[in-house]
Amino acid sequence: MNKEIPYKCSCGGDLKRSRVEVEFFGINFGLKDAEVCTLCGSEYLDQDTMKEIETEVKKRNIFGLERKVSVTKINWKSRS
Ligand SMILES: [Zn+2]
């Protein structure tokens, strides 16, 4: 499967479909489909991947917050 990519990188280089290892905010998302510029090496993730990353980052942030809150509660309880 070799789909042509109808647009080019902002530097004018051609984009090539590839799989890149994606990591954001210390969270590893593994190998994802991306378009990589053959000239400057810029990586472009597709919208689905960006959405997935956004959702995951939000989820982790909420979990982190909840953990902090519950720890505070425990500290508060043990004090009284
Ligand atoms: Zn480029």
Image (cartoon, helix red, strand yellow):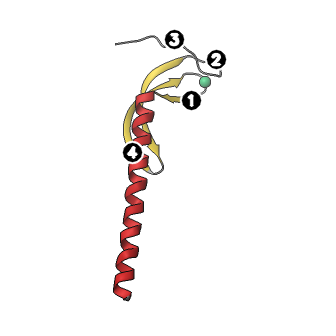
Mark pair 2, 3: CA separation = 12 Å
Mark pair 2, 1: CA separation = 11 Å
Rendering coords of residue 44 (x, y %): 51, 28
Of circles 1 and 3, the one toward us is 3
Q: Mark 2 near ligand 1 (CB under 8 Å)?
A: yes
Residue drawn at point x = 45 percent, y = 44 percent: 23
Q: Name the residue under label 2.
A: 12
Of circles 4 and 3, the one toward us is 4
| Category of crowding for the residue at label 4, using alpha-carbon neighbours closer than 10 angstroms: few (below 14), some (14–19), many (at least 20) | some
Amino acid type shown at disc 4: Glu
Q: Are marks 4 and 1 in contact (CB under 8 Å)?
A: no
Q: In this view, does 26 lie to the left or right of 80?
A: right
Image quarter where ligand 1 lies: top right
Amino acid type shown at disc 2: Gly
Mark pair 4, 2: CA separation = 32 Å
Along the polypeptide, which appears first: circle 2 or circle 3?
A: 3
Q: Are marks 1 and 3 in contact (CB under 8 Å)?
A: no
Q: Are marks 4 and 3 in contact (CB under 8 Å)?
A: no
